[in-house]
Image (spheres, rainbow, N blue to C red):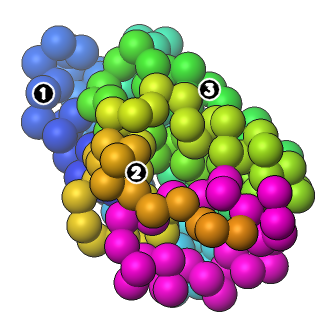
Amino acid sequence: MFDALSDLNVFTSITAVGSGGADALSEGLSCNQEALRLTDLGDYIGAERQHKRVIQVKESSLPKYHTSIGISYNGLGEVYILMNRLDNAEHYLLPAIELRKTNGPIMDLAISRDNLGKVYEMRGDLAKAREIRLQDAPNNMCCSNYTCTGIMQVPLSRLSRCGKCKSIFYCSQKCQSVDWKRHKKYCRQQ
């Protein structure tokens, strides 16, 4: 969800990539919006197809380390998490993190790390989930509730940790409650 805004911000600063890159970003933004719409409708296969199309266009038209490519990798990783295709999610989230370490808003890096934390959490490796989420703490964290509409980048001091597994972080009790339906399947004492 956060990445549509990030892609729009990237699109508004296209002067450095030339007309081919501008066309790629324009097509990417349109496809990204469609992928988000399909995800909201529960059409994950359609969303996957759109994200892959965006990635293909961006990788062929933009510099290798362009911020927008990391945004698309993260978006596809999120869809794969929803599809429970964890190996595929990890395959795209790892390069998203690498791209976002050097390019783009630092908030995007926290989001990709949290998504990878969900992959490890779903695999039952809560220690690894906690480790990836805490990278760059205490100042660059995000709420682990995917649908959080609050502040996207939060310092660790303003987050609550799950009292049982201690591997996931929330900005509020409301966000923890909303995410509990998903998280309770993986939560266990640490």
Image point (39%, 45%), residue name: 156
Q: Secondary structure at mark 3?
A: helix
Q: Residues within 10 Å of mark 3 (few under 14, many from 20)?
A: some
User: Is residue 52 something one can see in this rendering?
Assistant: no
- Does residue 123 appear left or right of residue 77 in this picture? right
Comes first in the chain, label 3 or label 1: 1
- Does residue 44 appear left or right of residue 31 in this picture? right
Q: Which of 164 and 186 lies nearest the eye of the viewer?
A: 164
- Does residue 12 appear left or right of residue 112 in this picture? left
Image point (55%, 79%), residue name: 179
In this rendering, the answer to whether 179 lies above or below 34 is below
Q: Are marks 2 and 3 in contact (CB under 8 Å)?
A: no
Quadrant location of the N terminus in the rendered image: bottom left
Give, as a single range, the part of the protein colored magenta.
165-190
Give me the disc on residue 95: 3
Give me the disc on residue 13: 1
Q: Quadrant of residue 33?
A: bottom left
Q: Residues within 10 Å of mark 2 (few under 14, many from 20)?
A: many
In this rendering, the answer to whether 40 lies above or below 89 is below
User: Is residue 127 something one can see in this rendering?
Assistant: yes
In this rendering, the answer to whether 92 lies above or below 21 is below
Q: Residues within 10 Å of mark 1 (few under 14, many from 20)?
A: few
Q: Kindly identify which residue carries mark 2.
A: 142
Q: Secondary structure at mark 2?
A: loop
Look at label 1 and name its amino acid: Ser
Q: Is 175 included in the stretch rendered in magenta?
A: yes
Image point (60%, 66%), residue name: 162
Task: From the top left corner, tell me how far across and down residue 138 is, in percent.
Answer: 40, 34
Quadrant location of the C terminus in the rendered image: bottom right
Q: Nearer the viewer, mark 3 or mark 1?
A: 3
Task: From the top left corner, tell me how far across and down residue 115 is, in percent.
Answer: 59, 51
